[in-house]
Image (cartoon, rainbow, N blue to C red):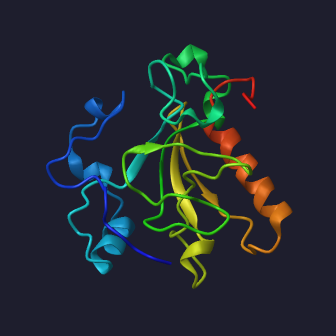
Amino acid sequence: MSFTSSDWVKEGETPDGQLWPYIKAIDCHMCPRFAQLVKETQCDDTKVSYVMNSYVGRRGSIWSSWLGSGVTGVTKESEVYRASEVITFTEENTWTIDGYSEYPFNDVHFTVGNATRQIDNYATFHNAPGDLNQGSTNMVFGDGHAGSRTRKATNPEDQAAVDKELEEGFRIAWPKKEIPY
């Protein structure tokens, strides 16, 4: 694991996204466990830990163009296919995990990839059984309920299990019925 503090959302920076203006208190954007992790890595100027699903609430094209040109997220609740199964907010790690994520937490947008292109992926630092790569993340869904997701594929050698988990992770972030790839 390597920890860096290159482009994190720091004190003085403004979180971006459709829902951030409705949540004014900056403290509610920081998970206490995440705050401890950044303190341990000398990155204590990071002020938020929750990230918004890039596919929800974005106008026009999605944050990352990896799905192809013209692919858009949703801007209205009525466009979300399964609101109780699609995340709006979650957490990321401050580090990458080989075969699982390409980028650590570095902004307030969360773009979940799939087995072909990992991009961002869910945090693994809650309830970790001695290994921060094997825990779970907190998440808020489109219907307003909160839940968690545990990383299932813990053996990077089992590529089929990792690929399956990446596909499942994409499906709980993707708000439309049709899968664009």
Residue nearest the viewer, comparing 72 with 26: 72
- The residue furthest left is 12
Give the vertical position of 68 relative to 116 (above or below): above
Q: Is residue 175 above or below residue 109?
A: above
- In the image, 148 versus 50, the foreground residue is 50
Q: Position of residue 141 (x, y in %)?
A: 55, 38
| Residue ranking furthest to the bottom | 130
Question: In the image, 20: left or right of 142?
Answer: left
Position of 42 relative to 71 (above/below): below
Residue 93 % position (x, y): 47, 63
Q: Quadrant of the C terminus?
A: top right
Residue sticking out furthest to the front? 69
Residue most toward the right?
A: 160
Residue 17 falls in image quadrant: top left
Give x and y (percent) for residue 135: 59, 70
Q: Position of residue 161 (x, y in %)?
A: 82, 62
Q: Residue at x 65, y 36 (%)?
A: 85
Q: Residue at x 48, y 57 (%)?
A: 92
77 and 72: which is toward the camera: 72
Q: Is residue 154 left or right of residue 112?
A: right
Count of numbered circles on the image = 0
What residue appears at the point 20 percent right and 64 percent down from the top-left corner? 45
- Please state if 152 lies on the left or on the right of 44 as rendered: right
